[in-house]
Image: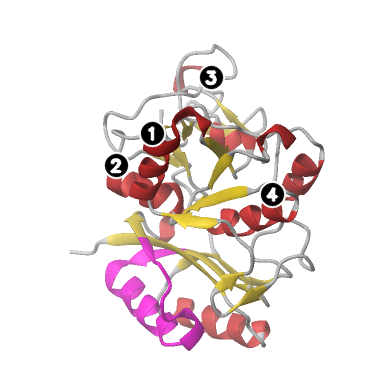
Amino acid sequence: MSIPKIVLFYVFAPLPDPEALRLWQHTLCEANDLKGRIIISPHGINVTVGGELAQVKRYVRATRGYAPFRDADVKWSDGSGKDFPRLTVKVRQEIVTFGVPGEIKVDTSGVVGGGTRLSPQGVHDLVAQRGDEVVFFDGRNAMEAEVGRFRDAVVTRAESTRDFVAEIDSGRYDHLKDKPVVTYCTGGVRCEVLSALMRNRGFSEVYQLDGGIVRYGEQYRDAGLWEGALYVFDGRMTTTFSPQAKTLGQCTLCSSPTSRFENFPDPEGRDLKLVCERCSPAGTPAGHA
């Protein structure tokens, strides 16, 4: 019986020949019939691919055979290559596009000057010690936070990752500079960079949730500090950690609870909005209600 799986991982490390790695990764994915997205830069690699379990395992083993990727923290979830329209493997200046490639420095240990890593348990320990002083800072686009976020988290106005530098530089969050700030994102990759950018701008006590929301949800499901659904960048649109997940989102048209995204008002467009099945012009499910 075939078992479809999706893997998500990233590695920050100096990569002297990103184009050679692009060709290798593309060939490796095609050989294993995987689909998804891979971004490679001089700073590292960011991967989300899916396919049949045995083939995904072969891909992961081969990728870890390259020394800089040996210790990649691979996150597994249910799904398949069918959740992606195609395979894309690209070289870019940054594996996460904050628009400041010259500011980010990496070495064999990862991003230089990033926030202190906290495990999910470490986050709980910090909250137990410091209470309401702790600030959760969402490192994702505002749209993603509509369906799920950490309780009482700060959500920026960012519509894309490129917006974060201007958001931080605006002074809007300067009152947090002396507070313990825990940055979080889907799998952790955005906060590797965001936490360094915040420290560069005078935030004195910055942490990053190691492994992101995915690792936190694996440990605590919906019995911790996370609430709602998790937006994911594939055909599933959203996923939850348990049947007890809260529904935080509201339909754009009728305000009823929903975690269901679709391209609206143009089904062929890219303007994702929360639209419940009852109000959907398409009349067919997209994402999770």
* Numbered mark located on residue 251 in the image: 3
Amino acid on which disc 2 is placed? Tyr
Q: Earlier in the sequence, mark 3 or mark 2?
A: 2
* Numbered mark located on residue 220 in the image: 2
x and y percent of residue 240 in the render? Answer: 36, 38
x and y percent of residue 81 in the render? Answer: 42, 61
**Label 2 neighbour load within 10 Å: few <14, some 14-19, many 20+:** some
The residue that label 4 is drawn on is 161
Within the magenta stretch, is there residue 61? yes
Q: Is residue 48 left or right of residue 219?
A: right
Amino acid on which disc 3 is placed? Cys
- Which numbered disc, 4 or 1, marks the residue closer to the eye? 1
Determine which quarter of the picture holds residue 224.
Answer: top left
**Label 1 neighbour load within 10 Å: few <14, some 14-19, many 20+:** some
Q: Is residue 271 left or right of residue 254?
A: right
Asked if the residues shown at circle 2 and circle 1 are in contact, with their CB atoms under 8 angstroms apart, the answer is yes
Quadrant in which the C terminus appears: top left
Residue range in magenta is 49-75
Residue plotted at (67% across, 87% down) = 16
Q: Does 108 appear above or below 34?
A: below
Between the residue at mark 3 and the residue at mark 4, the CA separation in whole angstroms equals 24 Å
Between the residue at mark 3 and the residue at mark 2, the CA separation in whole angstroms equals 27 Å
